[in-house]
Image: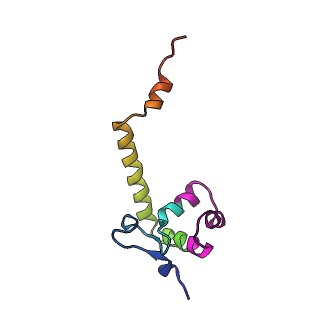
Amino acid sequence: MTTASTRIAMIPGVAGGQPYLAGHRIKVRDIVHWHEHLGRSPDEISAEYDPDLADIQAALAWYFDHRTGIAAAFAARDAFVATLRARQPSPLAARLIEPKDV
């Protein structure tokens, strides 16, 4: 019998030390993002990527057991992106908001 605990791995140096699907290197947080933030169903995620439906369900089960840790990882990622954006504004965005001479 395969359980969720055998489908999820955490190994330092692999996938940044974050939980991932064993044998796939797809991070649990990626599956959570696709499901919770993009609204994809487990069937859709399974069809689009290599893991079977049980792998996707195991990742979501792991997430629900460790929700605060995943939420903290998303918050850290968002803060990091905001810091990078503040340091390096987008040249395209600057051009789009410049007044145009007509």
Judging depth in this view, the residue of 98 and 5 nearest the camera is 98
Q: Residue at x 49, y 68 (%)?
A: 63
Q: Is residue 34 above or below residue 100?
A: below
Q: Is residue 2 left or right of residue 72?
A: right
Q: Look at the image and tell me in which quarter the N terminus lies.
A: bottom right
Image position, residue 16 (x, y; %): 37, 64
Residue 6 location (% of width, % of height): 48, 81
The residue stretch that appears in magenta:
33-57
Residue in the foreground of this view, choosing between 85 and 66: 85
Predominant SS along the magenta part = helix
54 part of magenta stretch: yes
Q: Nearer the viewer, residue 98 or 37?
A: 98
Total number of numbered discs in the rendering: 0
| Colour scheme of the picture | rainbow
Give residue 65's position: percent from left, percent from top: 48, 72
Which residue: 47% across, 68% down?
A: 25
x 51%, y 69%: residue: 64
**Figure quadrant of residue 44:** bottom right
Question: What is the x, y in percent for residue 76?
Answer: 38, 53
Q: Residue furthest bottom?
A: 1
Q: Quadrant of the C terminus?
A: top right
Q: Is residue 4 magenta?
A: no
Q: Is residue 11 left or right of residue 65?
A: left
